[in-house]
Amino acid sequence: MRTEVEKIVGAAAVDERPVRDLWPATTMAERAGQTPDRVLVVRPSGREQVAAILRWATANAVMVTPMGGASGVCGALAPKRGELVLDMGGLDRILEIDEVNLTCRVESGVNGMTLEKMLNEKGLTLGHYPSSLPGTTIGGLVSTRSSGQESSRYGSIEDMVLSLAVVLPDGTFAAPRPGPRSAVGPALHELWVGAEGALGVVLGAVLRVHRLPASVIGRGYSFSRLADGLEAMRHVMQAGIRPLVMRLYDHEDSVFNRYDVSDGECVLVIATVGEEEVAQAEANV
Ligand SMILES: Cc1cc2nc3c(=O)[nH]c(=O)nc-3n(C[C@H](O)[C@H](O)[C@H](O)COP(=O)(O)OP(=O)(O)OC[C@H]3O[C@@H](n4cnc5c(N)ncnc54)[C@H](O)[C@@H]3O)c2cc1C
């Protein structure tokens, strides 16, 4: 098998090692001495190599798992001996940042934080901040239908994806054309948002980006009951306010995060953003 895949990607792009994500059960099993199986890890450098690997794997009934940053916590990356892992880290180019139409076009192996920093330098943001961002790739974020800490303002990854380029298991390439919107049926790329690699390999994405807000106002509120904090959050969202961040910590988490709380109190953190007057007005509501 190794010889066959080396013919496609070259010997330097094939490795053999244990692979796992950060699923707590596997982490604990490893601590108890159970090392995951060693598997072949292939690092393609372009679309043709991905397609050729998938064609070969389909013809030979070899299971393939695409891998991004391996920061998943659900055990999706748990390949067994004889299977193949497709390390997408070799496709890591940021191809275009369109500062007029506020979109970017990236390959799937681009690191989430690298993209965010690049956007920030141009006064932009993806607005997608799962706390694991530095350990993720765009392909992984898309394939897990991830949601971040700024979702109350910008939505989750499905609200950012305008188009995807994918390779299907038979090696066929598909890239629905991005456009403002379509009046013709559902957007096909949505099939792959949350597909966890089961419907093919995501090669790249066109994503919606945003201008960095002019000002950010952060405030903290304490509640004696968690339910009251939840009710306050519901009220904020239903009033049409879209805070950048809105996080409710139960008492234990509030203490863990070193908030100054009395017995049993919970903390709600809210950040409003926008032009200064708007952010201030929303903070005052
Ligand atoms: C400390 C911590 C905090 C976290 N916080 C959050 C959070 O706030 N929100 C959240 O949503 N998640 C969170 N996660 C989970 C994880 O970071 C996300 O699921 C992330 O989207 C995974 O991205 P990845 O690149 O690491 O993907 P991986 O873990 O490598 O892969 C995840 C899945 O996507 C598939 N996949 C990866 N790349 C591709 C590709 N190119 N094409 C097709 N399939 C692919 C894999 O096969 C696998 O099924 C957290 C994890 C940790 C460890």
Image (tube, grey):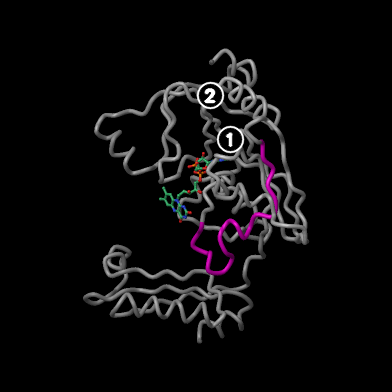
The residue where tag 2 is placed is 62
**CB of residue at label 1: within 8 Å of ligand 1?**
yes
The residue where tag 1 is placed is 88
Residue 230: image quadrant is bottom left
Tag 1: amino acid: Met
Q: Nearer the viewer, residue 256 or 174?
A: 174
Q: Nearer the viewer, residue 181 or 95?
A: 181
- Label 2 secondary element: loop
Q: For the view shown, which residue lies furthest in the front direction?
A: 185
Please tell me which residue is depicted at 58% across the width and 49% down the height of the picture.
142
- x and y percent of residue 283 in the render? 51, 82
Q: Mark 2 vs mark 1: give the one in front.
A: 2
Q: Which span is picked out in magenta?
A: 147-167
Please tell me which residue is depicted at 46% across the width and 71% down the height of the picture.
246
Q: For the view shown, which residue lies furthest in the left direction?
A: 263
Residue 174: image quadrant is top right
Number of marks: 2
Please tell me which residue is depicted at 65% across the width and 39% down the height of the picture.
203
